[in-house]
Each structure stands twice: as structure tokens, then as C-alpha cells.
Image: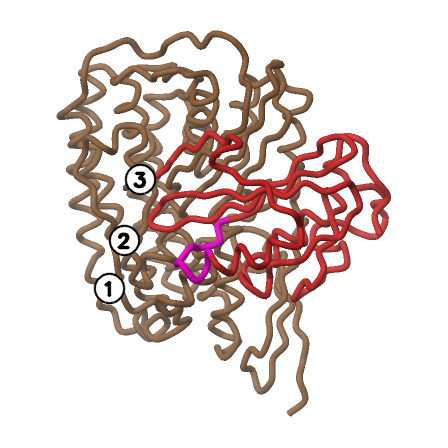
Chain colours: A red, B brown
């Protein structure tokens, strides 16, 4: 099935623990899935990170939820093209990614003068 | 020779938009390219928290002027899925017609800018002269040359009557003839080929692996286009993606050039099959849930992630534009090319920094 619209629910979007994300994306890459992008949402004291992948226009999503400021593994070693969006989420939401192939040190979009993560509902201090 | 670091952009004579790259060169050969974004970042996604979900249509239309109607279409498509709204058939076909007009004017704009990038100013003027015909159609049908604000949740806000349909179809004939007259120049001219053939090659495997989108992906031999999913009325139209195989600057140019003719065919077919129905249905309730919506913009696949919590404000609007997807492939293509080819190579991904820094 080819998807232009996918409504996300618990059945089609499994929640993974952060330590499983590299293994799971590697399995999907070996199956021929392409990295599309990632999305993140502020849930209050937690951040939700969604990974969007597709194959033959069929979209699948993986979900990781972590407390704000938590470090999660970078998938750059699996999908090199994830480097920009991981840096973006780091800057805008304060999620630290362990193993970024290119770390912009919080300055892909922002400058040093920006003290808080601007896309959180209540910003946290930028590292 | 020692390595030299050259800041490229954000203001550059060739670039229509402010992309910034830090280039490391050795003997005028690029060894490394590092991007820097943020020059025009506006934080439009954040506005979802203080503008209700219907006001957000006007905001997403301003993410990028060139793709305005497609941003709105992608957004509305997602909201309609969350609110279980079925768009009337006529509205689906009208969305296709405006979307393809957008694709034509975007590609004609790009073909002109590309010609200008390697110094072919008369070709630039010819493409932009033709583009004005499409801009006139957009102004007449929507009231605006660039921001074509026709989408609403549940359908479209405007109709195209029989008189306007005739004018559009007559204009398509003229545009088709005039663009065809430029075919030999853009495809066979010695100087054009000298600047594009074999330059910035992106292999099929790398294009897929690096997540390329749109003509950048299809020019490397991958027949992937979101219109294949059949959104709006594409499922009822004859559609096959335009594909090239060489993966170089020339292939990306040919791909976009041929997509202009494909857009003309789609507009003709959409008018031939245009059904009679209401233009929009009223959406009841408030968006609740999470959805991912995708459409094919002129530059490639655009993705919207929307999250509603049953209030009139959305919890999250996330926009992944095609240029954002095409920056990693661009960084893959740049090392090894001549410094003089960098502007031409960058332009072949049709960069839209306004989109990227939404």
C-alpha cells in the first residue's frame, strides 16, 4: 500500500526504548527502507521523537519517548542523512544525540546568545 | 597546496536564496562542504501554538511562495484525515490543476535561474517570459500571482468556470509550443552541456541512501514521486514519474524540463475529467490525533506531521521540505568538483532556503 496520509496510532507506530533504535533502524535499512525524516514533540516533562522511514512509498514510523534533556543514540551510523535533523532537534528541543557524525554544537540554526530551547513549550537551558 | 576555507553564501550573486556553505578547497577542488542554516529561520511551526488550525493554512502557505498551494494542500490533507472529512471530487481535481500550474511556474523559474547561473541571460529571459503566462493564470484564478490561496479544510475556496478553463487550455498550447522552442537550446547547446554533463554525479544508490527527493532523486534513476500514491485526483489521472538515469546536473535539468510538459498533460486531463460537485464540505469538530501527510512539491516530497489534541490549536506542526532532504545529497556531490562548478551544482537541487528554514 502506498501512503500519502498515515494516521499514527499505537498499532502502526511501535514505541521503542532508546537503546533499540539503532538495531531497529539497521534492520529496516537492510530491508530497503529509506530515511525520510524525524519529528519531535514536547510532551511536558518528556520529548517524543518519531522516526519516519519509507519503502516503495509505504511509510512507517518508530517512536521514542524520553525525559527532557536525556541522551539518545544517534542513527547517523545507519542513515548518514539523519545528521541535519538530529542537530535540529538537539537545538530546538534539547534532545542530546550520542554519536552524531557531525555535531554543530547547537549552532546549526541558532547562535550562542540563545539560552533556551526555542521549540519547547517551556524551554530548557541549552547545553 | 594548503587547504583553503571559503565561506560560500549566504549572499552570493548566483544564489537566489541564502544558503551558507563553508567550503574547504585544495587547488580549487572542493574537499569538504559544511552547511550553516538559520539566516532566514522564522519559526513558523511554533505559531501553531497560538494560531488555530484554520489560520495555520495562511501561515503554511507562506513557508514558501513558490510551493504555497502545495504546502496548504499537504496541511489540509492531514487535517482532513484527522477530522474524517471526505473532499468533494471537483475540489480534488481543482487541487491538481493549481498544483500543476505551481509546478510549471516553479520549474520555469528554476530553468531561467539555472541558465542565468552559467551566464546564458537570453535563455533566462525566455523562460521567465513564458512563466509570466502561468503567473497571469494564477492571478486570474486565485487573485494572487504567487501565494495561491485556494485550499481550505474540506476542499477549495474557488472554482474555475468554463471561460477560465478555455483560457487556461489555450495558454497551455502556447506555453507548450514556446517551451518546446527552447528544448534544443537547453538540451543540445555546447556551453550548457559543457557546464552540466558529468558534473555533480549522484549515483542511484547514493541518492536513495542519502534520502534525496524530487527531481534530484528521479534524475538518478529512481522512479519515486508522491503523486504515485494517488492523493487529490492523481489516482484518476495517467501519471508516470519522469526519470533520468545519469544523475548529473544535466539529468536534473532534463528531468525538470520534461516535467513541465507532464504538468501540461495533467492539467489537460484534469479538465477533461473535471466532475461537477460542491467545492468544499464543512468540517465538524476539532482535530484530534497524529497524522503524517505527504505531497509532491516541484522540488520533491514534502512531509507534514500534525498533532491535534481536540483543541482548536494544534499541539505540533512539523514540516519537512524537499530542500532539507536534498542538502545531505548535495554535501555528498560537492567534494571533488571544481570551485567554479559549485554554484551550478547547488542550483541543480533547486534549493529553497525559505522552505528549509520555515
Horizontal side, residue B54 vs residue B230: left or right: right
Q: Dot 1 falls on which chain?
A: B
User: Nearest the camera: A110 or A22?
Assistant: A22
Q: CA distance from mark 1 to mark 3?
A: 37 Å
Q: Secondary structure at mark 2?
A: helix
State the image quarter where residue B59 is shown.
top right
Residues behind callouts 1 and 2 on a single chain: yes
Q: Which residue is mark 2?
A: B257
- In the image, taking residue B45 as reference, residue B231 lies left or right, namely left
Q: Provide the residue span drawn in magenta.
A: A28-36
- Quarter of the figure with the N terminus of chain B: bottom right
Q: Are marks 2 and 3 in contact (CB under 8 Å)?
A: no
Work out whether mark 1 precedes mark 2 in sequence or the reverse, and give the earlier one. Answer: 1
Vertically, is B179 above or below B25?
above
* Residue B28 visible in the picture: yes
Residue that badge 1 annotates: B187
Q: Position of residue B337 (x, y in %)?
A: 48, 77
Residue A74 in which image quadrant: bottom right
Mark whose residue sits in front, 1 or 3: 3
Q: Nearer the viewer, residue A125 or B347?
A: A125
Image spot of residue B216 (x, y percent): 38, 58
Residue extending farthest to the bottom is B1
Q: Which residue is mark 3?
A: A1
In the rendered image, the vertical position of residue B323 relative to residue B50, given as above or below? below
Q: Chain of mark 3?
A: A
Amino acid at each position: 500500500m502506498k501512503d500519502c496520509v498515515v494516521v499514527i496510532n499505537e498499532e502502526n507506530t511501535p514505541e521503542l526504548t532508546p537503546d533499540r533504535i539503532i538495531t531497529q533502524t539497521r534492520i529496516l535499512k537492510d530491508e530497503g527502507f529509506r530515511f525520510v525524516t524525524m519529528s519531535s514533540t514536547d510532551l511536558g516533562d518528556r520529548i517524543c521523537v518519531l522516526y519516519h522511514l519509507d519503502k516503495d512509498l509505504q511509510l512507517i514510523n518508530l517512536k521514542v519517548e524520553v525525559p527532557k534533556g536525556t541522551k539518545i543514540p544517534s542513527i547517523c551510523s545507519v542513515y548518514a542523512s539523519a545528521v541535519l535533523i538530529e542537530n535540529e532537534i538537539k537545538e530546538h528541543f534539547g534532545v542530546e544525540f550520542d554519536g552524531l557524525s557531525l555535531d554543530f554544537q547547537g549552532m546549526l540554526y541558532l547562535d550562542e546568545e540563545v539560552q533556551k530551547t526555542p521549540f519547547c513549550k517551556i524551554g530548557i537551558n541549552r547545553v | 597546496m594548503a587547504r583553503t576555507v571559503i565561506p560560500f553564501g549566504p549572499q552570493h550573486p548566483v544564489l537566489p536564496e541564502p544558503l551558507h556553505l563553508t567550503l574547504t578547497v585544495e587547488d580549487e577542488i572542493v574537499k569538504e562542504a559544511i552547511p550553516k542554516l538559520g539566516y532566514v529561520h522564522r519559526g513558523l511551526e511554533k505559531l501553531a501554538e497560538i494560531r488555530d488550525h484554520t489560520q495555520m493554512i495562511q501561515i503554511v502557505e507562506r513557508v514558501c511562495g513558490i510551493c504555497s498551494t502545495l504546502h496548504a494542500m499537504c496541511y489540509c490533507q492531514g487535517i482532513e484525515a484527522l477530522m474524517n472529512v471526505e473532499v468533494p471530487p471537483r475540489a480534488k481535481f481543482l487541487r491538481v490543476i493549481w498544483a500543476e500550474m505551481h509546478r510549471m511556474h516553479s520549474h520555469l523559474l528554476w530553468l531561467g535561474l539555472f541558465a542565468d547561473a552559467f551566464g546564458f541571460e537570453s535563455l533566462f529571459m525566455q523562460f521567465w517570459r513564458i512563466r509570466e503566462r502561468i503567473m497571469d493564470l494564477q492571478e486570474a484564478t486565485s487573485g494572487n500571482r504567487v501565494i495561491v490561496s485556494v485550499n481550505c479544510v474540506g476542499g477549495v475556496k474557488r472554482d474555475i468556470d468554463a471561460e477560465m478553463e478555455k483560457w487556461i487550455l489555450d495558454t497551455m498550447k502556447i506555453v507548450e509550443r514556446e517551451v518546446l522552442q527552447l528544448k534544443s537550446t537547453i538540451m543540445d547547446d555546447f556551453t550548457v552541456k559543457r557546464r552540466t554533463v558529468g558534473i555533480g554525479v549522484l549515483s542511484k544508490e547514493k541518492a536513495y541512501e542519502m534520502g534525496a527527493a524530487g527531481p534530484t532523486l528521479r534524475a538518478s534513476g529512481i522512479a519515486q514521486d508522491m503523486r504515485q500514491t494517488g492523493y487529490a485526483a492523481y489516482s484518476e489521472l495517467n501519471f508516470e514519474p519522469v526519470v533520468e538515469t545519469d544523475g548529473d546536473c544535466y539529468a536534473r535539468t532534463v528531468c525538470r524540463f520534461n516535467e513541465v510538459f507532464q504538468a501540461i498533460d495533467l492539467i489537460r486531463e484534469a479538465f477533461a475529467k473535471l466532475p461537477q460537485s460542491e467545492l468544499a464540505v464543512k468540517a465538524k469538530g476539532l482535530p484530534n490525533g497524529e497524522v503524517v501527510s505527504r505531497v509532491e512539491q516541484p522540488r520533491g516530497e514534502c512531509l507534514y506531521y500534525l498533532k491535534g489534541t481536540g483543541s482548536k490549536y494544534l499541539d505540533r506542526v512539523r514540516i519537512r521540505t524537499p530542500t532539507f532532504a536534498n542538502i545531505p545529497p548535495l554535501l555528498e556531490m560537492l567534494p571533488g568538483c571544481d570551485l567554479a562548478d559549485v554554484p551550478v551544482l547547488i542550483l541543480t537541487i533547486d534549493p529553497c532556503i525559505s522552505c528549509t528554514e520555515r
